[in-house]
Image (cartoon, rainbow, N blue to C red):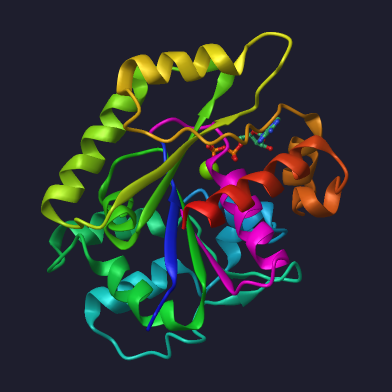
Amino acid sequence: MNMCKVYVTASQKGGVAKTTTAGSLGIGLAKKGYKVLLVDADAQGSLTASLGYKEPDSMNDTLAVIMEKEIQDEEYDSNIFGILHHDEGVDLVPSNIELAAVEVALIQAMSRETILKRYIDKVKDNYDYIIIDSAPSLGLITINVLVAADKIIIPVQAAYLSVKGLEQLIKTISRVRRNLNNQLGIDGVLITMLDKRTVYAREIVELLDDAYGKAINIYNSRIPFSIRAVEATTKGVSIYKHDPKGKVAEAYGELTEEVLANA
Ligand code: ADP
Ligand code: MG
């Protein structure tokens, strides 16, 4: 039986640590011995760049090509095509600006919401966890990601929490659940970039609880703000490599445990 679980980091807001969380959770799981595939589903290629592939736009075999092949029903070896083996123990399907063209091509495609799921279902047997990093939009690529996923992780940046901003995402999730993927669930809301001096996690949790009751899990792990996280992104290595003893690495290690406990 295939036990692979597919997670996506999603938010209609940019700069809330979706990409950082996808990479850190994926490498956190790999460090525990799990087989992990990271999928960059953002045309910005931020996850790809954050893992040290500095020029995503010069790459050839990317998620865009895979999705085009799926749209065309073209034969290819899904076990190897477009999959990079990263030295921190994860596999990666990179992305670049070509994914923006796929967003347009999808409009005309047959079964346009399930193209990515077809690919994910083909590679699932090779992995314990697949983590998809999505773009801050609710376009067709992101819908494809939500259709392919089992669980959503929603990062919210502590200093700019907007409960209203979450509403649109949660509406989209409900719509996808009703029409396209009734397995889809929210694993949790992750409070990121928490600066203890200015914002108290307790207030944020209260705000979320007021708006959504206990319906949505809020992870106990909170990711503190640290310049080390920015440095890691810039350097193209994980936080575990850049600052292994730091508080961000510790917090993402805790999140990894929490996600495993929920699974
Ligand atoms: P998103 O994918 O939601 O746009 P990113 O993961 O790309 O967000 O993060 C946005 C920026 O914030 C990046 O420069 C990243 O290095 C930085 N960042 C991520 N996590 C933290 C953190 N815990 N503390 C400080 N900066 C962070
Ligand atoms: Mg991102």
Task: Report the quarter where the N terminus lies.
Answer: bottom left
**Which residue is drawn at the image coordinates 88% and 44% (left, top)?**
245
Q: Position of residue 44 (x, y in %)?
A: 51, 48
**Would residue 3 appear left or right of 58 to someone viewing this image?**
left
Q: Residue at x 11, y 52 (%)?
A: 179
> On the picture, is 172 further left or further right than 245?
left
Q: Is residue 111 magenta?
A: no
Residues 202 and 140: in front is 202
Residue 12, quarter of picture: top left
Residue drawn 77% across the image and 47% down it: 239
**140 versus 158 height, above or below:** below
Residue 65: horizontal and vertical position, in percent? 40, 72
Location of residue 155 with respect to 70 vertically, above or below: above
Residue 88 seen in the figure: yes
Is any atom of residue 42 visible in this view? no
Front-most of 250 and 39? 250
User: What is the x, y in percent for residue 118?
Assistant: 28, 74
* Number of numbered discs overlaid on the protein picture: 0
Looking at the image, residue 8 lies above or below residue 75: above
**Residue at position x 31%, y 53% in the image:** 146
Left or right: 120 with respect to 253? left
The quarter of the picture where residue 167 lies is top left
Which is more toward the observer, 75 or 119? Answer: 119
Report the span colored magenta.
Answer: 12-41
Most distant residue in the top direction: 198
Verify whether residue 40 appears in magenta. Answer: yes
Q: Give the image location of residue 60, x and y in percent.
A: 53, 73
